[in-house]
Structures are given as C-alpha cells and as structure tokens.
Image (cartoon, rainbow, N blue to C red):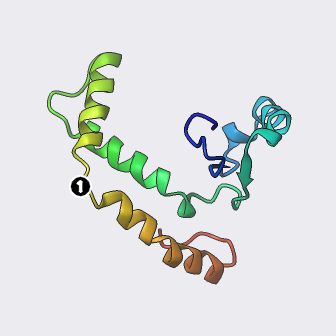
Amino acid sequence: MSIVHSDGLGQFQHNKATPHASRVATKWLQEHSSDFRHFHWPPKSRDMNIIEDIRDALLHAVENRSPPPRTPMDLLTALQDSWCKFPPGCFQTLVESMPHRFASLLHAHGGPTQY
C-alpha cells in the first residue's frame, strides 16, 4: 500500500469472500491494520466490486483467443495483451456506474441486484 499510495490516501478493500475471510488473511489484516485505511464493504457483495467486472472482461477476452494460451507464459501474454486492448474509457464507465450500483444495493436492502 505504501508503494502504490505513497500519499497515504489509499484504502484497502475486500468483500469478505471466503478466501479473504480465512484465519490467515484475517490475522494478517488485524496485524497490519495500522498500516492502511480499510474500506468497509458489504460481505460477498460482487455487485459493488468493479474489479469483478474487469476480471470477467479479461477472462472473456482470453477465452476467445485463437489459439488459446497453453502455458503460464502464454496466459500472461494473453492477459497483458487483453488489458492493453481495453478501450480508454472502459474503467471510467465502471467508476461512473457506482452511484447506480449503490442505489440498487440500497433498494435491494443489501441483497442481490441486477448487476
């Protein structure tokens, strides 16, 4: 966190997915909680995490490659190529969708939304 956000303004976010809530991860987060700010997030709330949308887009792009990646290095190259081909406004569109996502989550009382 100190490397990526040397200004101290970064926040750590996780959605308490099963791997993130393991004893090891929970203990590490508790031990390092003074090293960063933690953004509290609804548990397992995929609807609110734009990283999931980006991961899905990368997965889709890699799955549609011909020929498909066959080695770990091929996969790394495919992911990097796919990442570079995202349209410039792609991420901004996801960020701008957040108010609507929050409103949908509130309307659903924290339950699943249409995302």
Residue closest to the eye, 90 or 114? 90
* Residue with the most extreme bottom position: 107
Instruction: Measuring from the top left, give residue 27's x and y in whole percent.
Output: 84, 33
Residue pictured at 70% horizontal, 49% vertical: 16
Q: Does 20 sit left or right of 104 as displayed?
A: right
Q: Is residue 70 positioned above or below 43 on the image?
A: above
Residue pictured at 37% horizontal, 63% vertical: 92
How many marks the image carries: the answer is: 1
Binning the other alpha carbons within 10 Å of mark 1 as few (below 14), some (14 to 19) or many (20 upward) gives: few
Q: Does 87 sit left or right of 33 as displayed?
A: left
Residue pictured at 69% horizontal, 78% vertical: 109
* Residue bearing the label numbered 1: 87
Residue closest to the eye, 42 or 11? 11
Q: Secondary structure at mark 1?
A: loop
Q: Quadrant of residue 21?
A: top right
Q: Quadrant of residue 81?
A: top left
Residue pictured at 69% horizontal, 40% vertical: 20
* Residue with the most extreme front position: 7
Residue closest to the eye, 5 or 18? 5
* Residue with the most extreme left position: 66
Instruction: Measuring from the top left, give residue 3's x and y in whole percent.
Output: 58, 34
Amino acid type shown at disc 1: Pro
Q: Is the N terminus in the top left, top right, bottom left or bottom right quadrant?
A: top right
Instruction: Measuring from the top left, give residue 93's x and y in whole percent.
Output: 36, 66
Instruction: Measuring from the top left, give residue 52's x and y in whole percent.
Output: 48, 51
